[in-house]
Image (cartoon, coloured by chain):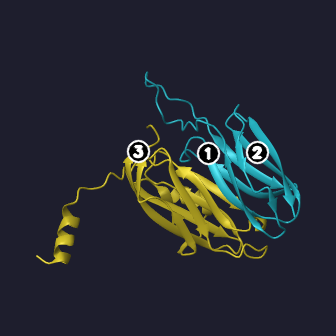
Chain colours: A yellow, B cyan
Amino acid sequence: MGLSAMTAWTGRVRPTQAQGPPRDIQAVVKTLVGDTTPVEGRISLDLPEIAENGNTVPYTVRVESPMTSSDYVKAVHLLAPANPLPQISSFFFTPHSGKATVSSRMRLAQTQEVLVFAETSDGTLYTARRSVKVTVGGCGG
Amino acid sequence: MSVKPRIRLPENARVGEVIEIKTLIAHPMETGTRRNNDASLVPRFLVHTFEVKFAGREVFRASLHTGTAANPFISFFMKVSGPGEFEFTWIEDGGNKTTERHNLKVT
């Protein structure tokens, strides 16, 4: 068996990851950012690949932007779709922010893909996602 | 929110410099989904808003939700426009506010 076939095989039998019930994350996204279609890019989301304690998972979001009064990042939203409640935080910047970079700590109830959205002053919506494997879930649910 | 929040920023800054500001406030950030031993829900109790003004002008704001860890730590940046005073405000469920002020020396 070739290596690629092996990968495909292990991929197929791997048990389904605990993602929880599929929730209507789109509705939450819509209330936050409206109907704008997001594009990928400009955002880097730093998160550990494996979070041993889901109660406190450090993260940094950086959005590329000149941060001038005519071109700046207005808002950044973070979502954990598999948490009991998906919203993590929203951050609102101004041209005086200098950099659209923010660090904080999130709770993750289980292994999942964290979503981030960034709204710019010209109305563009950027998005990025990152998987985090959670060993011990947070949220005390 | 009886414990004084911790704020770290540079002692001095130059005009035009982008400085990092680190803040932390002690708070349980109860989600409202956690249960007591008798199966009753622990009521939601969050710091839901964090606002930062410099020289009377808003520079940064955060809305915190249940997915933010207890004792919220937030680090962000500001481009220094000149000397001034920072005003940091945390607002929790129930409306209590904690406000801290810090002068920034500009060289």
Dot 2 or dot 1: first in sequence order is 1
Binning the other alpha carbons within 10 Å of mark 1 as few (below 14), some (14 to 19) or many (20 upward) gives many
Direction from residue A17 to residue A8 in the image, left or right? left
- In the rendered image, the vertical position of residue B97 relative to residue A31, given as above or below: above
Residue type of the residue flagged with mark 2: Thr
Mark number, residue B72: 1
- Could you say which is closer to the camera, residue A40 or residue B104? B104
Q: Secondary structure at mark 2?
A: strand
Binning the other alpha carbons within 10 Å of mark 2 as few (below 14), some (14 to 19) or many (20 upward) gives some
| Residue at image coords 43%, 53% | A23
Pinpoint the chain carrying mark 2. Answer: B
Direction from residue B22 to residue B82 in the image, left or right? right
Q: Quadrant of residue B55?
A: bottom right
Direction from residue A46 to residue B4 in the image, left or right? right
Residue B74 position within the rendered picture, expressed as x and y whole percent measured from the top left: 64, 52
Cα distance in 3D space between marks 2 and 3 = 30 Å
Pinpoint the chain carrying mark 3. Answer: A
Pinpoint the chain carrying mark 1. Answer: B
- Could you say which is closer to the camera, residue B1 or residue A40? B1
Mark number, residue B59: none
What residue does disc 3 label? A137
| Residue at image coords 63%, 60% | A102
Mark number, residue B89: 2
Asked if one can make out residue A73 in the rendered structure from this viewpoint, the answer is yes
Cα distance in 3D space between marks 1 and 3 = 18 Å
Residue B96 position within the rendered picture, expressed as x and y whole percent measured from the top left: 74, 34
| Residue at image coords 53%, 35% | B32
Query: In which quadrant will I find the N terminus of chain B?
Result: top right
Binning the other alpha carbons within 10 Å of mark 3 as few (below 14), some (14 to 19) or many (20 upward) gives many
Residue B66 position within the rendered picture, expressed as x and y whole percent measured from the top left: 55, 44
Contact, CB < 8 Å: mark 2 with mark 1? no
